[in-house]
Image (spheres, helix red, strand yellow):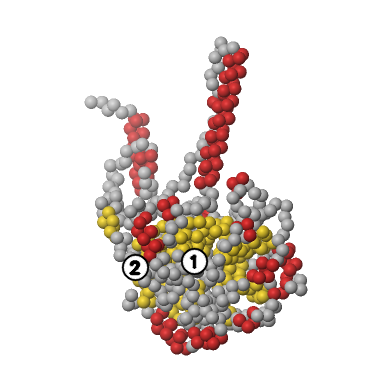
Amino acid sequence: MADPMTDYEREREENIRKNNELLLQLDIQGIHDQLGVPASSSSKAKAPVKRSHTKPPKVKSEAVELPLRRSSRMQRSIADPNETPAQKRKREKEDEELRERAEQERQAELERVRAAHKPRHQDLDLKTLVDDLDNDEIPKLRGLLSSLCSKKHPRAVGSGTSSRDEEITANDKLEDLKTRVRRAEVKSRAKISADRVYSMAYHPETSKDVVFIGDKHGKLGVWEPFAIPEETVDEDGETVTTEGGRHWTLQPHWPSTSKSSVSAMKVDPIDAHSIITSAYDCTIRQTSFTSGLSRELFALDDVLITSFDLPPNGHEVWISDAQGCLSHVDLRQDKKHARRWDINGTGQKIGCVSVNPVTPHFLVTASNDRTLKLWDARKLLSLPISLSSAPPTVKGRGSKKQESDEDLPSMNETEYEEVSKYLISKRGPGLLRAEHPHNLSVSSAYWDPSGRRIVSTSYDDTLRVWNIKPSSLVLDTPLKKFDPIIRRNHNCQTGRWLSILKAQWMPSPDVYPHFVVGNMNQSLDIIGCQGELIANLGDKNLISAVQAVATCHPSRVGRYATGNASGRCVLWGPEDH
């Protein structure tokens, strides 16, 4: 029987076969399928891929379908060739009304889409905060938060006296601290978030451990590391045991993108019955444990809030932002009394502000202009308000009030020119009590619980500690000397993929003063107020990432929590826990 294929067809088939073999040799997967050509018979069968039991976290889709705009020609009705002039005018009028109505609907849909990507300023209940949480998990979360309100935990504050300071810095206190801290080890681990950890806070409750985590996308994680793990059945019928206790995720800041990274958080210093968070969505919110309600305390318009702090009475908030300004709001007053001062004049970010817990009118700021500065808040509050052509709002500096901002009160602002004039006046020297230059940007600066010491972290790879006698702050004049007593080398080159290292004091005033800071060698450093390394905690078998964010329990020595860039957190505790 004659071969039905022509020479050309045979040559073509041979070329296809050779091309397929070449593609397989080059390991270019799937090309033959895309070309619609069957694979060569000489190709090897692929080995079955093993299915991982670790399921990726659910990510809420943020894609929003925008309304399409149709041309006027497409919206016109079909004209009747026999219509009268009156009928034509009526038809054209109806077409115009239809076009106007369609455009109004399109604009309304566009506004809805824009609103979905704007910060939320309204009160948010617990159900809204945990939109993705299963219904049976909400009562469990509410029960945990309610248990934190069984009694009050006001922030502990030191006396600031020299006699008390000598007592807590005695050698026996140091030796006791070393003994307790060096027993700490990894006790629990869990992946709390799918994104980078930006900030953490340890609740002062002593009957259980509860840690709060702020991530890159505006989420607030609630982690109970020693809770009994729960077994659940996934969609494939497999039994899954939760890792490292239990945790839940809330969304107080919006949108759920990197525009809402949680820059700082504090447990309410009055009773510890709420958590206060700031984020890059330009808002500060307070989430109550009793009601589950999240309400806005402060907001700026398109200005990133970098940090905040509260005095022990919890009635005021001091805020730093990315434009080099400080803001103040008294929570007992209407928001229209909020104040804002440009204290840099360069527009460079103030990355941290800290309130002295013993004498709350003294503030310390850390800035990208490479300086650490000590301010007298009483002088700031006495400065006159600048007059501007467009009165600022609480949402922004010098921005015109929009219709959507009608509920946002005006904000009183003092420009840098007024601040600089005051500094050179007769009354001005007491405003800026001291400043100290660093070689590079200052990442953070915090007062210790005694109100005597300051620790700063800088990109010049140096940790600095100041010890300030309270008597030197009595006079209304700048300090004669403001040099750190300790300089300690510490690698702070985190780069763009890690959260900035920030040394944090142990909040208890009854133990030897010390602070914690992440180490680029994937460990945690505990350092004393004299610069001595008390302990370096690490575990190469369990930890393989830099623990950039660190915090410690306010009263229980040797209990620390750390977080890394992948959203995984570690709790450190004594070996006998």
Query: Marks 2 and 1, Cα distance to the nearest angstrom?
Result: 23 Å
Q: Is residue 361 above or below residue 405?
A: below
Q: Residue at x 66, y 52 (%)?
A: 399
**Residue 190 percent location from the top left of the image:** 37, 64
Residue found at x 61% / y 48%: 406
> SS at mark 2?
loop
Q: Quadrant of residue 555?
A: bottom left
Q: Amino acid at mark 1?
A: Asp
Image quadrant in which the N terminus is located: top left
Q: Quadrant of the C terminus?
A: bottom left
Q: Is residue 58 left or right of residue 238?
A: right
Q: Residue 551: percent from the left, percent from the top?
A: 46, 70
Q: Nearer the viewer, residue 221 or 316?
A: 316
What residue is shown with label 2?
226
Mark 2 Cα-neighbour bin, 10 Å: few <14, some 14–19, many ≥20 = some
Q: Give the x, y percent position of residue 560.
A: 42, 72
Which callout, 2 or 1, points at the residue further toward the start of the chain? 2
Identified at 62% across, 63% down, the residue is 327
Residue 523 can be seen in this image: no
Residue 356 — which label? none
Q: Residue at x 47, y 59 (%)?
A: 287
Identify the residue position indicated by label 1 in the image.
268
Above or below, comparing residue 347 to residue 406 in the picture:
below
Residue 80, given in percent of the width and then of the height, sits at 54, 14
Q: Residue furthest left?
A: 1
- Quarter of the figure with residue 367: bottom right
Question: Identity of the amino acid at label 2?
Answer: Phe
Q: Is residue 295 left or right of residue 576?
A: right
**Residue 428 seen anywhere in this rendered image of the structure:** yes
560 and 457: which is toward the camera: 560
